[in-house]
Image (tube, helix red, strand yellow):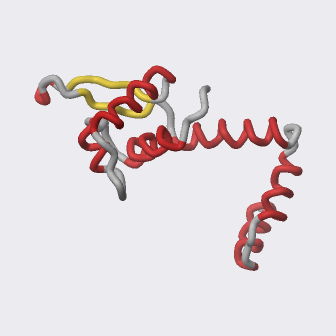
Amino acid sequence: MKPLTRAEMEVMNVLWDAEHALSVNEIVEGYAEQKPAYTTVATFLKILEAKGYVEHRKKEEAGRTFFYSPMLSREKYITHVVNDVKDTLFGSSAKSFCSFLIQNEELSDEDLQEILSLIHS
């Protein structure tokens, strides 16, 4: 699985948040701020399709417009990325990975209690 760039991730987030396949125009409208150009999004979609992250199809009632949908879930992508970081940077040790996160994040007492309850469940 090839990693996503930040810009590709933004396109994927719009697609993952949608409940149905989207056209390029709908993806552009899905951006919260500083909407990119139509051609920019179309280029990213071609790249994402080549990487195997999205697929497109036509709807008969929409003429020549393509509609794009993700080929994997956000959760599956996150799992892959986190496992890759764990394996590559922490020698496949979940303990070292979790230890690093806990020591390097500013966690509130409430956050720590929630983590402990997850561990005990």
Q: Is residue 41 above or below residue 59?
A: below
Residue 25 image offset from top left, x and y in percent: 24, 41
The answer to which of 87 and 28 lies nearer the viewer is: 28
Residue shown at 72% from the left, 70% from the top: 114
Q: Give the quadrant of the N terminus.
A: top right
**Where 75 sits versus 120, above or below?**
above
Quarter of the image that includes the C terminus: bottom right
The residue drawn where x is 45% and y is 40% is: 12
x and y percent of residue 86 in the render? 79, 42
Of 110 and 97, which appears nearest the observer?
A: 97
Residue 36 drawn at (x, y percent)? 34, 45
Residue situated in front as seen by the camera: 116 or 13? 13
Is residue 117 rendered to the left or right of residue 30? Answer: right
In the rendered image, residue 54, in percent from the top left (x then y), is placed at 42, 28
Name the image quarter holding residue 90.
Answer: top right
Q: Residue 47's image quarter?
A: top left
